[in-house]
Amino acid sequence: MPQQFQPHPHPHLHLHLQAQPHVPHQAAHPHGPQQPYDFQQPQPQPLQAFPYPQAQQPYLPHQAAHPQGAQQPYEFQQHQARIPESPTPTDVHHTTAYDSHAAEPAAEATPEPAESGPRTRGRRAAGAAAEPAPTPPGTRRGRKAARSARKAEPEPATAAPQAARGRRAAGAAGAAAEPAPRTRRGRRAAGPDAEAQAGTAPTAPEARRGRHRWAGLVKAVALCAATAAAGMLVLRGNAALDGLDRSPAAPDASAAATAAAPLAAGSVPDPGRVVQIIAHPDDDLYFMNPDLRYSISAGHPVTSVYLTAGEADGVNAAPAKGATTAPNKPAYAEARQNGIRAAYAKMATGDRAGAWKRTVVPTKGGGHAEVDVLVAKPQVNLVWLQLREAGHGYADVPDSLHGLWNGKVARLESMLSSGTPVKQRFAYSKDQVVQTLVGVLEQYRPTTVRFQDPTPGRYPDTKQYTDHQDHFYGARFVQMATAAYAKDVKDRPHFAVQNYVGYVNGSLPSALDPQEAKEKLDSLDTYAWLDRQNHCGSDAGCGDLKVSDQPAGNRWTDTVNYARGTGTNWLTSDKDHGLWAFKVLDGQVAVWHRPGPVGPWRGPDLLPGTGMDPGVTAVTLKDGRIAVFGTRTSFGARPTDYKREVVHTVQQAPGADGFGEWQSLGTPETADETWTSDISAPAVSVDGTGQLAAYVRDGSYSLRGRLQRPDGSWGPWEKHGGEDLHGAPVTATDGAGRRMVLAATSKTVVGWAQPKAGAPLGRVTATGLPDTTLPLTAEGREGGVRLWFRKPGSGNVRTALMTADDGLKVNNMTDLGGLNGFGSVTASGHVLAGRAAGGQLGAEVGPGRPWGRSPLMFVGAPSSTMTGKNMVSLAVVGLDARLYVTSSADAPNAYLAPWQAVGPRNARP
């Protein structure tokens, strides 16, 4: 194994847990207006929900009426009444103080009722979009469109409210450039409302005719737009293409049919709500940034939940002074919390000394948690569960999350920081930890859940874990909690999951460009309290001095990698030019389907079967059916029963909505204890003979694969060699139907190829490519297989054509530039897209064309596909767990159409 594969020890990695009991140290906090952390001691009577600001949280926490008493377990209550969500996200600064008392009920503004039904959404969208000038009614085409609109006109009794809503939408769209209402053109553009505002109140018949004319105009515009979409018209610039993915006819009003609402130019999609759950203070800064900073900077609701207190050995000092510094675990835990608060405040406001309100709340597991709310940005919350940490990366420590998971201890005790408002000690069983996390999810109702890698693997030579045991056993607790939340809590939005690689990042090529890496390091500098100024007013200290000598860790601030969900083959097209999208929501595979080129979208529909891990891939079989592959996690009755296996399902018939039962291909791993169930997502392809094959990277960092036999059964897991493989492999077939498999290592890319279609896969071959960041994308084109990847330390996209005529060869590696960023890129036709710096989607729509940036922030990887021969479709799932789609003609000088959101906001199961 290469030497650089060994990690640099984390400052907290080799610290052994001390066994003596701890008495919380009460830090002397000065009082006065300069005090940044304002909390009050908890009173005995209230049991309150998490104090998320009501004006920011679309779902208000229910105040539980619970029996008093310290020993009574707290049960979060279900909402008694649904609080309508705000139509658009807001970023209101609040100055309300959040203390440890139950908050007084706030006066609530009554939002407008949510739109119901595809028809209403379609009309409002049509009115709000910036459409080209409609066809003049005097022309033959215009008269025909007008007649069609009049035939579809509803009865006057029902048309009035619809028309009124249409006028309001049209008025909002036209506010920027409003023609003079006195002119004929101005009166048409402004509609009847403008005449009334100008003092020329129309008579009842005139108003009725005006409403009918306006409704007819709206319908004619929508019809023209849909007709243009059917003709594969791609509009340029900011011209709206309403109805690109909708039928020209009125969409089906059933719950199965979902209108796709276009995003207006410059509009911001629903940000969703992010909850990230990590083991220690600083894991989020090291391993989840820059995603964390992107969400905070965009003003999105973000809540970080810390499982342990992070007390380590209690020594808050640089390594050189560690031997002369007295240990104090409660004080060191407080110092690390102070460092986190400072880093978050700086990311959110630019001021590390931003004020926080520290509150104590009961948990569903029967203990108490501290909840901190950033006063200037109350959508930023921190939740401290304050359990003991292991104090060592891999040693056997019974009093730890690992020991609790495996049953070595029945309960894990709390470790309260010296400054926390939580004063009553507690201990959790395994189930109580899970229930505590379920309660947090119930209160914050996330649409994206971020946590660490539950299956990080072991080093091949030493067999030690490649990540801290708190990291991945903490992630397993989160897996159990999200599964229970998805199963037991029905009144909630859908949610997606994102997992992050930990310590092993230091052995991999840097994924971030210098500016992004600097921003990430700045947050760690703040956390590490480099200047030693007591800006927090705490005797414990304002940061983690243990990392102050090396805030970057083992190059962790230079990179970020997703542990799962990096595949780009989850969007596919069928023979009728319909689209199918497959992503994991709520631990199940969600399916979205658009029949034909302009049919109404359906979904998300959840396929039966739970425990699905983020990231699935879709492949079209020889008979035209679609097969979906992924991995599934199951827990079993015993701790050792934890298992991750490859599964797949096959469409019942080409174009059919139904899919068969999930079938298991098992796993090449013999037991969880061997490699911590560390297998990659499967890479799947069909060669020129129609043979289906699936490949994974196994726990020993080599390639394994299974082939489907002609009778439909599968052969055994075969060993294909390779070493030091990371991430997930990719596969595609060339023009001769030969299958190629490619995988990244810490230094280069290696590959395998069939000598001919139907033959066994050849030997592992060095490609000679330079080091790349982990995610690879492969597609068969130009007679070979084209590979896309990113340049380390830059984020620029590179590509190379792989051929296999006389063995695997690389042809013409090219740097395509980009908008920096990191992660997977997707490529179909002339369209290339991936995450840009800042977290939004960046796209190039032709060689040499400038890269464009969309407002979309998304989970995992984008995906694209050819829809027919002349159209490219592109999709992402946003942080709101909602599908967004766009299209472009596969032609020179084409542009992406406006993005369309599929389904209602924050859809519920």
Image (cartoon, rainbow, N blue to C red):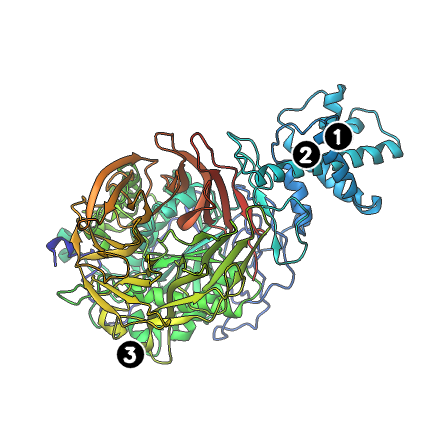
Residue 302: percent from the left, percent from the top? 45, 50
Q: Amino acid at mark 3?
A: Lys
Per the image, the residue denoted by label 2 is 170
Point out the tag, 3 or 2, that comes first from the N-terminus: 2
Q: Amino acid at mark 1?
A: Gly
Residue 166 in sight = yes
Per the image, the residue denoted by label 1 is 191
Q: Quadrant of residue 682?
A: bottom left
Spatial separation of the CA atoms under disc 1 and disc 2: 9 Å
Quarter of the figure with the N terminus: bottom left
Circles 1 and 2, Cβ within 8 Å, touching? The answer is: yes
Residue 726: percent from the left, percent from the top? 24, 56
Circles 3 and 2, Cβ within 8 Å, touching? The answer is: no
Residue 55: percent from the left, percent from the top? 58, 48
Nearer the observer, 596 or 347: 596
Which element is circle 2 on?
Answer: helix
Quarter of the figure with the C terminus: bottom right
Which element is circle 1 on?
Answer: loop
Point out the tag, 1 or 2, that comes first from the N-terminus: 2
Per the image, the residue denoted by label 3 is 408
